[in-house]
Amino acid sequence: MNARISVRCDSTALEAGNVKIFALRLPASHGPCHDIDPGRYVALEYADMAGGVQQRMYSVTRKPAPDVFEIAVRRTGTRGVADRLHASLQEGAAVTLLYTGGEITVDAVLVHSQVLMWAGGIGVTLPIALLRELAERAKQGLPVPGVTLYLCCPRVQDVPFLHELLELDLTSAWFDMQVFITRQPIDSGWSHFHAGRPSDDMLRALPEPGAVLLCGGHQFAAETRSRVRDLYPHAELLIESFSAPQAPVPEPAPAAAPSTAARAMIAIAGREDGLPADPARSLLENLEQHGVPIRSQCRSGICGSCRVRILSGDCRREADFCLDDKDVSNGYALACCTYPTAGELAIALGPGN
């Protein structure tokens, strides 16, 4: 689905950790949402608290009816789109659905006998979607993989879907959940709760997973991916992250000769004029600011839509989750994970841009 559709809010419900569940209904003229499955994501267009229209992506956590799907949104307190959704998207109100995406559905894990799901905070939305689908299969007597969920949250009260996950753990032989509380002292006597983060020893003690699902912010996904590659080199990696890489903190110019610092510029193959660049913004944001057409979807290094080729110059590259070593050695980069530095950065836009 790649079309602007106005979907209406059927209902809302509060969940732990400043999370609100929105049930969204497609218009009758559209018919059933065949390509909106639990585990995939939807891109919504909505204003932030300042009135600026933004695009954000949310995992589909449940599909209670053929034309209804649910998303879970965490209020951040940063006056962004999430805060505006919490404040104003009530029953009967509308939000614009731009497109759907994502390949991680229950089918992606059914081919494995053991699966590790490792999520940070609101990143649990994808695991909860898949676990609900697996639980339904198990009720029907269909085979499901053994699943371990490692969930990291700052405080106990921040854990979304905690009661549902605990019930599933206590009633299902195929599922085990462990919660890691990172910013709150807790009693070590609880069987499902641990202080700090998962250790390598804990990870090595797990049944060897055929697939590892990583879900959370960009930094969380990048750090856990590195550990998983070392611990489970043969496991299939399934990664979802909807947050952009953290922008770099600009280094102060030398006090003795500030005028000697080379200004960051972007040169695009086939275009005559160079574009001034802000090193605190990603290459994608810089191109968009100058009105340069470039495809983008996830803005977090997952989908690969904003792929470009670096022809010359220096840049800072944050971890992405779709380019392999051969792509990187051939000069390819994702604009959403690349930051210009001093001097000229020459690039070639990908096909279709």
Image (spheres, helix red, strand yellow):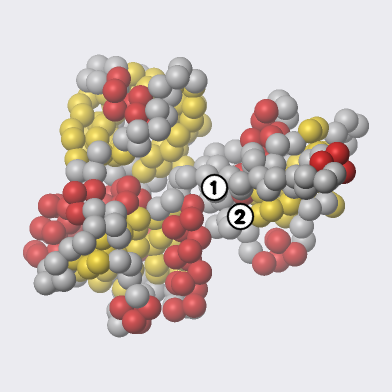
Q: Secondary structure at mark 2?
A: loop
Residue indicated by mark 1: 246
Measure the alpha-carbon separation of dots 2 and 1.
Answer: 8 Å
Residue at (70, 61) in percent of width and height: 327
Is 87 on the left-hand or right-hand side of 278?
left
Question: In the displayed structure, would residue 321 be above or below residue 266?
Answer: below
Q: How many marks?
A: 2
Q: Residue furthest right?
A: 272
Point out the frontmost of discs 2 and 1.
1
Amino acid residing under circle 2: Glu
Residue that numbered label 2 is attached to? 318
Residue placed most toward the observer, 179 or 60 = 179
Q: Give residue 353's position: percent from left, percent from top.
A: 72, 36
Given the image, on which type of amino acid does mark 1 rest? Answer: Gln
Q: In terms of image quadrants, where is residue 23? A: top left
Q: Position of residue 29 (x, y in %)?
A: 35, 19
